[in-house]
Image (tube, rainbow, N blue to C red):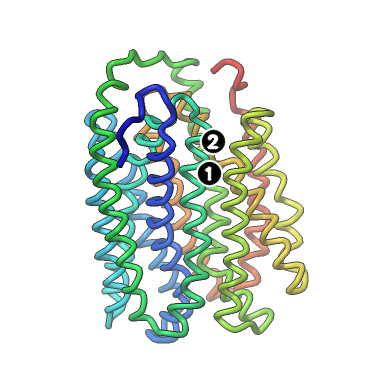
Amino acid sequence: MFRGQGVSATAWTVLIAISLCHMINDIMQSMLAAIYPLLREEFTLSYWQIGMMTFAFQVTASLLQPVVGMVTDRKPMPRSLAVGMGSTFVGVLLLALAHEYWVLLSGAMLIGIGSAVFHPESSRVARIASGGRFGTAQSLFQLGGNFGQALGPLLAAFIVVPLGRPSVAIFSIAAMAGSAILWRIGNWAEGRRKAAAARPTAALPFSRQRVAVAIVVLALLTFTKNIYTASISSYYTFFLIEKFGLSTQHAQVMLFLFLGGMAAGVMLGGLVGDRIGPLKVIWFSILGILPFTLVLPHVGLVATGFLTVVIGLILASAFPAIVVFAQELVPGRTGMIAGIFFGFAFGMGGIAAAVLGVVADAKGIEFVYQICSYLPLMGLLTIFLPRMERL
């Protein structure tokens, strides 16, 4: 399946395959958030309980991903990718068949475990397959994930809502297919990683203190992005239903617009970053959405749809640059970097989602978006990042 691709050449078949599996992984993740209105009605859940489900998923991934990344930096285990997707498969079945709230939490946690195993090792595989085109490979890899996040609500709207919650089990078939593909990818990567490991690891481009400060700043920027993303993915449908009286199906289509904008932003950010530099993309991405987030809680339905696309597009554009920047700052620690930026920062977004659920119960869902509209001001921290020319 993946034969005939040299170590130094860009292995496009592998990159497309790993991106496809990233899409499958993230469809399951976004499916969880997309069926919240159904779960709330069926199980009579509060916003706090919904926030706890997001917390269970994201914090499980957050706690495990950096650990998995550090372990696999020392001993890469590409065949573990199939095992991670197997965990996601079980989690999806639990969501479909659950009769009690704690089973829903367990399903969310298993999906989180699958994500924790998948991201560090798959990010390493994407870098090995890049042939030196690290930005392009990272963008293509992330594009699959963002496309999956965008598809989840749409599939929920047109399959799960009409057929009912048990129809979530249909998507376990995709998880099984993903596990089979990842087993083949793992076999391919096992042969390639030894050649990559034989190459000398580059020294740190800056002092340890400077690198540590830069990594913290990049993590905080990602954290800011993920808080806003969590507020949209977890509560945006409720915001639209409450403010505009939309049906659940129409609200999920609106959520698809936001996530679709993010998918486009990931690829666009990688392409533009290669031309103008990652720092400019980061500045534009984090601070550039501020006018739009400030206006969002105060406009009509049509303007809300337009703004969500623009916000998703701009917000997501910096992430490939952030990840590649961090990987260059700490050579040879691809798994750890993936664990931090795909795991820890996303987990912190899960904590924020739980907190925002408490705030929504107390002050209303519109108040949540008024608070979140100021988050892009954290983009000013970009001033503490070193200039990319030194890397």
Q: Position of residue 276 (x, y in %)?
A: 69, 29
Taking 88 as reference, is 292 left or right? right
- Residue pointed to by mark 2: 322
* Mark 1 Cα shell of 10 Å, populated few (<14), some (14-19), many (≥20): many
Mark 2 secondary-structure assignment: helix
Mark 2 residue type: Ile
**Residue drawn at (33%, 81%) of the image:** 166
Taking 312 as reference, is 212 left or right? left
- Pick the quarter of the image with the C terminus: top right
**Residue drawn at (55%, 62%) of the image:** 231
Examine the rendering and report whether any part of residue 192 can be seen: yes
Location of residue 164 by image quarter: bottom left
Query: Mark 1 or mark 2: which comes first in sequence?
Result: 1
* Mark 2 Cα shell of 10 Å, populated few (<14), some (14-19), many (≥20): many
**Residue drawn at (30%, 67%) of the image:** 172
Q: Position of residue 174 (x, y in %)?
A: 34, 62
How far apart are labels 1 and 2 at the CA level? Answer: 8 Å
Q: Position of residue 352 (x, y in %)?
A: 49, 58
**Residue drawn at (70%, 67%) of the image:** 305
Location of residue 97 by image quarter: bottom left
- Residue pointed to by mark 1: 222
Give me the disc on residue 372: none
Mark 1 residue type: Thr
**Do the CB atoms of the residues marked 1 and 2 lie less than 8 Å apart?**
yes
